[in-house]
Image (tube, rainbow, N blue to C red):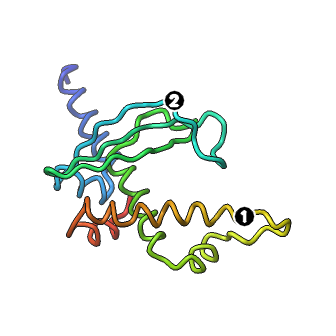
Amino acid sequence: MSPKDQARVLLATARTIIAKSELEEACDALGVRTKIEETDTQPPDGFVAGTRSWRVQLILGKRKLTVPFFTGPGIKDQPTAADVLNCIISDSTSGEMSEEEFLSEFGYEDPEDGEPNPGKKVYRACKRMAPRVRKFLGDEFDSLMNKQH
């Protein structure tokens, strides 16, 4: 087998082994594009040292949505459209819960020392994100919400 044929077989094998997720396939089918730049923005409290910060613009037709995005130090590649959508759809559905449901679901208990509950800040951020993501995805929101990634 020639080196060129060996390369073709290897590439075909790799494509079979590394299948795209349902969400990646959906992003491709919809034509979701990204513009991504790494930033020096400090991640919010609670992120581990070495977390990388990104500014991600998602583009779907004429609609655009720009969001901050953070990846752990073990992630070497920049995020994909599916990575970002997976997170912001999850955040959006969480933001559509009541505050009490959210705090209970994610294990935020009121601190005993009288300090503010950090979960309330997270909840408010998710709540603010929800209408932006729904507007950006339009009719595709519900179907993308159920895609595995």
Left or right: 61 as drawn, with respect to 73? left
Q: Position of residue 9 (x, y in %)?
A: 23, 34
Looking at the image, the residue that sits furthest to the top is 3
Q: Which residue is mark 2?
A: 40
For the point 39% across and 50% down, the residue is 83
For the point 14% across and 50% down, the residue is 62
**Rendered view: 7 above or below 69:** above
Labels in figure, total: 2
Q: Amino acid at mark 2?
A: Asp
**Rendered view: 7 above or below 43:** above
Left or right: 117 as drawn, with respect to 64? right
**Rendered view: 102 above or below 86:** below
Q: Are marks 1 and 2 in contact (CB under 8 Å)?
A: no
Q: Nearer the viewer, residue 105 or 117?
A: 117
Q: Position of residue 121 (x, y in %)?
A: 60, 61
Left or right: 117 as drawn, with respect to 11? right
Task: Classify the position of the N terminus by image quarter.
Answer: top left
User: Residue 82: which numbered mark, if any?
Assistant: none
- Camera-side mark, 1 or 2: 1
User: Would you identify the image quadrant in which residue 132 lies?
Assistant: bottom left
10 Å neighbourhood of mark 1: few (<14), some, or many (≥20)? few
User: Would you identify the image quadrant in which residue 101 lies?
Assistant: bottom right
Assign a secondary structure to mark 1: loop
User: Residue 116: which numbered mark, if any?
Assistant: 1
Q: Earlier in the sequence, mark 1 or mark 2?
A: 2
For the point 45% across and 45% down, the residue is 69
Q: Amino acid at mark 1?
A: Pro
**Rendered view: 106 above or below 34:** below
Q: CA distance from mark 1 to mark 2?
A: 28 Å
Task: Classify the position of the C terminus by image quarter.
Answer: bottom left
